Every structure is written in structure tokens, then in C-alpha cells.
Image (spheres, rainbow, N blue to C red):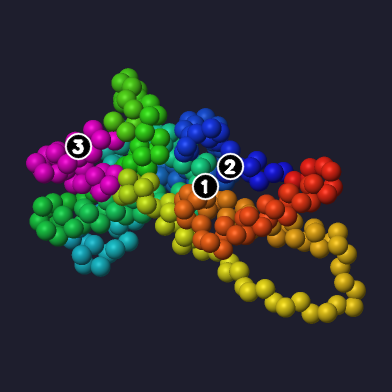
Amino acid sequence: MGWENRDYARGNAGGRGPSWRGPGSSRLIGGSIVTTLIAVNVGVYVLATMISPSQLGPAIYEWGVLQAKAVMHGEVWRLITTQYLHDPSGFGHIFINMLGLHFLGRPLERMWSAKKFFWVYTVAGLAGSIFFTILGSLGWINPYMPAVGASGCLFGILGIVAVLFPTATVYIYFLFPLKIRTAAMLFGAYAVMKVLSQGANYGGEACHLAGLVFGVWWAKKGDMWWSTTEWRIPRGKPRTARPRKAPRSTFTEKVVQRRADAGEIDRILRKVYDGGVHTLTASEKKTLGEATERQRREEASAGRVDRL
């Protein structure tokens, strides 16, 4: 299989960036972090509000809701646990959030990976929780006011999608078609207005706004940061080969070289796809050129194409 046929080299043939594909083609079973997140959120909601609302439900909310005063007294877990709790008074809150996660999250998970999506989703919600806590510590928000929901996470995903797929169409309340970039700008402006005027749900809107700002930042800068800092097994310096009693055949050496090329080129091309050619080091560019030249020579000498 040629390098140009790898999964990250497809999906936008002829285009300049990632292409939007709706959630229909995404996996709905094993391996999907979006499905897992939806299941966990719904499971916690059912457990807290339907199975044992009289005892366990209040305990979960008392322990996990976001409250600026509690966070300032060291209960920092609330910055995360609030992302998995929703308004117990009705099903509408969790329904809208999970619907948004389904439609906005699956294209990103397909383009990234489960691990990357989970961390970006979580940090977007964390940004909203931290901003809420800061406003509470300053007295702009009542420091004892509780807040729950995954909207900060969702607005982070919205900001990313609005930058990566600005012309994609979404339907507001299933009726009004808008370009997703326009929808994100309108939601952001509405959140700013509510926070400044301390209008209805202005604490929640503060979380929305912080999540959205984080999402826009991530779409512009975060992918490059991720590609340069994501943990990888370090490649050690090649050791000087010791003389062997039975040296490997030329064919065996070629097979070993091809395998080494395939692994290194996959890593380099993944980096190009995530961050652009400008993120490559001089050494990586040299490696890419040498591997390409080796493949060209082998194909010419063999008289046939046998791609990696």
C-alpha cells in the first residue's frame, strides 16, 4: 500500500484542509469515545434522577456540582465532575448536550483519535469551569451558586468545528439553517451579552464562552502543539553493527529497511497532516527524501511496483 493511500492522506482529496462528514459514518460501537461519553453522561443522569433520586441522587449532586466557593476551599474535583452532571429537573438539558456531542464530536473523533478527542473535550470543559470559578471569586457570580452540565465541553468542540469546517451547515432548533461559523459567532455574542448584563443563566453562559474561546484557540494553535508534545517512544541513536557470523542476505536487509522506512514515514506524514510541512525538522525532511529515493530505485530495478 502506497504512503499516499494511508488513512490520514485520504478524506480531503483535492482540498486544502479536513473535510466535513456527518456523524452517520462514524462507528457507533466499540472504540468510540463519543459513544462512551454519551453513555456515561446518560448513565449518571439516570442513576441520580430516576433510580435513586431520594438518597443517592442528591448525594451525587452535592458532591459533584461546580461551586466557586467549594473549589476555592480545595474541592477541585468539581471542575471535572460537573461535566458529567445535568439539570435534574428535566430531560431537555442533557438531551440537547448529548445531541450536540453526537453531531459535532463524531467528525472530530474520526479525524483525530479517541485519546485526543477525550483530552480536548475535557480541557474545554475545564476552561469553562475555571472561568466560572474566577468570576465567582471576584464576586461577579454568586460564589455559592451551583452549576452543572457539559456545555463548556460542547462549546469547545463547537469552536473547533467552526474553525476547521466553517461552511458546514447546522440547523438551530432543527429549523433554521446556518453556517456553523455564523452560529458559533452568534452563540458567542449572546454569551458575552448575558455575562456582562448578568442575565438569565449568566454563570452557564460564562462556561459556554470560555469553552468556545478555548475551542477556537485549539483549532488554530492546539493541533500544532499536540503534534510536537504528544508522548512517543524516543528513538535512540543507531548502534554500530557488530560483525556477525552469518550476515543477513540482501533481500532480508531490504525487508528490514522497508519496515523501518514505513514506520518513520508514517510518523512524519502524520505530523505533516496534523501541523503542516513547516513543522518538519531538517532531519525529518532529509529522512523523507532518502526513503522516497530508496523506494524509487527499488521499483525501477525490479521493473514493477511493490509499495510499502
| Vertical placement of residue 127 versus 183, above or below | below
Q: What stretch is highlighted in magenta?
A: 184-213
Residue 10 x/y as whole percent? 58, 38
- The residue positioned 45% from the left and 45% from the top of the image is 37
Question: Which mark lies nearer to you, 3 or 2?
Answer: 2
Amino acid carrying label 1: it is Tyr
Q: Is residue 203 magenta?
A: yes
Asked whether disc 1 touches disc 2, contact meaning CB atoms under 8 Å apart, the reply is: yes
Horizontal and vertical percent position of residue 251? 86, 59
Q: What residue does disc 1 label?
A: 273
Q: Which of marks 1 and 2 is nearer the N terminus?
A: 2
Residue bearing the label numbered 3? 189
Q: Which of 96 and 182 is in front in this view?
A: 182
In the figure, 137 relative to 270: above or below?
A: below
User: For the point 58% across and 67% down, which residue is it?
Assistant: 233
Mark nearer the N terminus (1 vs 3): 3
The image position of residue 156, as x and y in percent, is: 34, 45
Q: Say which amino acid is labelled 2.
A: Ala
The disc label shown at residue 9, or none: 2
Within the magenta stretch, is there residue 172? no
Q: Which amino acid does label 3 sit on?
A: Ala
Density class for disc 1 (Cα within 10 Å; few <14, some 14-19, many ≥20) is some
What secondary structure is marked by label 2? helix
Q: Position of residue 278 (x, y in %)?
A: 47, 53
Contact (Cβ within 8 Å) of mark 3 with mark 2: no
Which quadrant holds the N terminus? Answer: top right
Residue found 17% across the figure and 51% down from its top = 145
Q: How far apart are marks 1 and 2 (CA)?
A: 7 Å
Residue 195 visible in this rendered orientation of the protein = yes
